[in-house]
Amino acid sequence: MPRKKATAADAAATVTAKATKTSSETKPKATRSRKKDPEVRVLFASSEVAPFAASGGLADVAGSLPVYLNRSNCDVRVILPLYGSVSKAWRDKMRFVTYCYVSLSWRSAYCGIFELKDRGVTYYFIDNEQYFMRDSLYGEYDDGERFAFFSKAVIEALCRIDFEPDIIHCNDWQTAMIPVYLRDYRWVGKLAAVKTLFTIHNIQFQGQYDPYILGDIFGLPESDLPLMTWDGCLNLMKAAIELSDKVNTVSPTYAGEILDPWYSFGLDPLLKGLQFKLCGILNGIDFDTWNPETDPAIAANYSADDQEGKLACKKDVLSEFGLDDDGRPLAVMIARLTEQKGVDLLAPIMDEVIKNGIQVAILGTGDSKYEQIFSEMSARYPGSCSARIAYNTALSKRMYAGADIFLMPSKTEPCGLAQMQAMRYGTVPIVRKTGGLSDSVRDCGDGQGWGFTFQNYEPWDLYGAMIRAKDLYYDWDAWKEVRTRAMRCDTSWSRSAESYKYLYLDIKNTV
Ligand code: GLC
């Protein structure tokens, strides 16, 4: 529904733009300012944003979606914590705006506000050294307090900066307290009617805490217990889902999946009752930065029309991983080595995979159990299997470029960006049909797809898909066709950013 409405709005916008152009000949000044008026103003709140601070896909989304939206006549500004890890080079470009104190129960915490402009986006940084000058973004004993502070600081900052958004777009549990605290700020003129959108990037992490911190840490009254509680503990995501005007997930399939207990981590009864405000929009990737034609990080550049350079990229990866260069298909996995990513499907079939002539290179860190299994595999199959237990973005890019096959057999995958990055670099994905993997990869069995998919979360189903891929690889012309289709697939933000714009307009105009 938002799509329909927005298409109409979009058409209207085109008409206005045309009319504006004609009248610009007579009234240049007035027209110029009208033309610049954004269709919607949004404050995008995120606990991580690339390239400033990143630990996962959320940072990529927060770092690229606003860039694309602003190219499409929106005014989206981004707000994030000023972590200790934000580089000096970025800090040097920031401007100090102002400061204030944020009250959280009996605490009064300093909140500095800095501003930075980059790639057409204004970023606001919330400074508090006690909360954010830490070694890691998350996993601290006081994460609940840190992000409750951040959420309230976002609203306090909004009271002080020169920006009046129609919508605050919150992302994941770290910003889930924004709609909760916002209830107490409705008396502030510019916050009286501001709407909220809550995006679930991963429902596994909900921000769950002991009820005893409701008053002492979050500074909320007992009467908020029913709103804040789910399954016996405080649940920040639950409160945001309940209070936000709209809720979305990062792919249409995942929006349906989280209504099922297998995927919902306990929230399905809540979501079922609120389905009317739930939708899914598939993430995109930044085609400017993910481009094999121009990427300086890979061994040779290439494109869908001229794929010759890909061979040099494969040789580069084989030699980096100490794998034999003998023409076998090379499958790579780049992931957090956790159950969610389906690594426990790969481990039991590894022996057969290698015996069947598929080389495997793995890059990632995670559960020590898997780190050990894959390190042992490397030792057992020199030249055929190699694991690098590390988080290395430069090496991962070379692998996207150099591999033939990309493995992503996730147990659950809200969206997944890696499969899209692999496709863009001509590496054919093998994915389990779940979440965004299902929405972005079409099986080539129908003669039109660009990957291999399997349904059941079973090792031998993954194995079957890998064997199908290997067989096709030796039918070189057919393989090249599939690879070309993967490279030509439009997974850029330009399409998905339009869907967000429609959703924003829908919230602004009708909710
Ligand atoms: C989370 C999800 C991942 C998604 C990303 C960005 O990390 O696990 O599937 O792509 O968020 O939305």
Image (cartoon, rainbow, N blue to C red):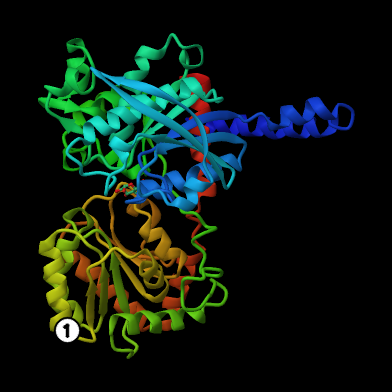
Query: Residue 3 at what x, y percent from top left?
Result: 51, 34
Q: Look at label 1 and name its amino acid.
A: Tyr
Q: Nearer the viewer, residue 269 or 77?
A: 77
Query: Residue 242 at what x, y percent from top left?
Result: 29, 22
Q: Nearer the viewer, residue 60 or 149?
A: 149
Query: Residue 376 at what x, y percent from top left?
Result: 12, 76
Q: In the rendered image, which residue does mark 1 sit on?
A: 381
Horizontal side, residue 317 vs residue 41: left or right: left
Q: Is residue 324 visible?
A: yes
Query: Residue 276 at what x, y percent from top left?
Result: 35, 25
Please identify the quadrant where the C terminus is shown: top left
Query: As drawn, which residue projects farthest toward the bottom?
Result: 326
Q: Residue at x 44, y 70 (%)?
A: 426
Horizontal side, residue 177 vs residue 76: left or right: left
Query: As drawn, which residue projects farthest toward the right?
Result: 26
Q: Nearer the viewer, residue 461 or 341?
A: 341
Q: Please, what secondary structure does the residue beneath circle 1 have?
A: loop
Q: Quadrant of residue 9?
A: top right
State whether residue 176 is above or below residue 454: above
Horizontal side, residue 323 vs residue 45: left or right: left
Using a 10 Å C-alpha cutoff, classify the residue at mark 1 as few (fewer than 14 neighbours), some (14 to 19) or many (20 or more).
some
